[in-house]
Image (cartoon, rainbow, N blue to C red):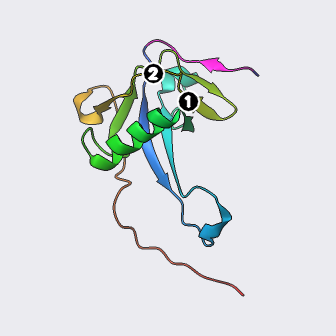
Amino acid sequence: QGPRNLQAHSYCTLLLRSDLLVDPSTGLKDEEIECEMNAEDMDGFSGLSFPIKGNDAQMNRLKYLLESGEHGRSGESILTNLKDAWIEEGALTLPPGLDIALEKVSSRSNTRNLAIVTGNKPILVVKVT
């Protein structure tokens, strides 16, 4: 199946996913920015998220905006202006030259409240030898 173009009203909720790597020397990324897609663009299916692929400037801008809290945080910010973006090979691809525009979820009346996914979380790590 080819790329799926998004509709002109498209937006998605930004999520900053952090992975705990047992062996950080593997070279795998421990953080990735994903977008939970608008159900209208996913044939009515909600909760679908895709990693974001963009150029270095776009990805650095997204990471800065999420980490600074200037326009919300993970799960609280909407990436708007996705009319020329597309989904291909399991990723949301941003077109070159797309101006990164974020909006806080609370300023939109038609979105749902998401669970808070930021902060310190207790975890149990077990190493089996």
Circle 1 residue: 45
Q: In this view, does 101 lie to the left or right of 34?
A: left
Q: Residue at x 58, y 55 (%)?
A: 29
Tag 2 secondary structure: loop
> In the image, which residues are magenta?
2-8
Q: Residue furthest bottom?
A: 129
Local packing at callout 2 (Cα closer than 10 Å; few below 14, some 14-19, many 20+) is some
Residue 124, percent from left and from top: 51, 78
Residue 127 occupies which quadrant of the picture?
Answer: bottom right
The image shows residue 25, relative to residue 55, as above or below, that is: below
Amino acid type assigned to the residue bearing label 2 in the image: Leu
Amino acid type assigned to the residue bearing label 1 in the image: Phe
> For this rendering, which residue is in front, 91 or 113?
91
Q: Residue furthest top?
A: 8
Residue 110, percent from left and from top: 31, 25
User: Does the rendering let one see residue 112?
Assistant: no
Q: Which residue is drawn at 34% across and 52% down?
A: 116
Tag 1 secondary structure: loop
**Residue 9: mark:** none
> For this rendering, which residue is in front, 109 or 93?
93
| Tag 2 and tag 1, C-beta contact below 8 Å | no
Q: In this view, does 87 lie to the left or right of 38?
A: right
Tally the marks.
2
Circle 2 residue: 98
Image quadrant in which the C terminus is located: bottom right
Q: Which residue is drawn at 48% across and 15% down?
A: 83
Most common secondary structure along the magenta stretch:
loop
Local packing at callout 1 (Cα closer than 10 Å; few below 14, some 14-19, many 20+) is few
Q: Which of marks 2 and 1 is in front?
A: 2
Residue 100, percent from left and from top: 39, 27
Residue 20 occupies which quadrant of the picture?
Answer: bottom right
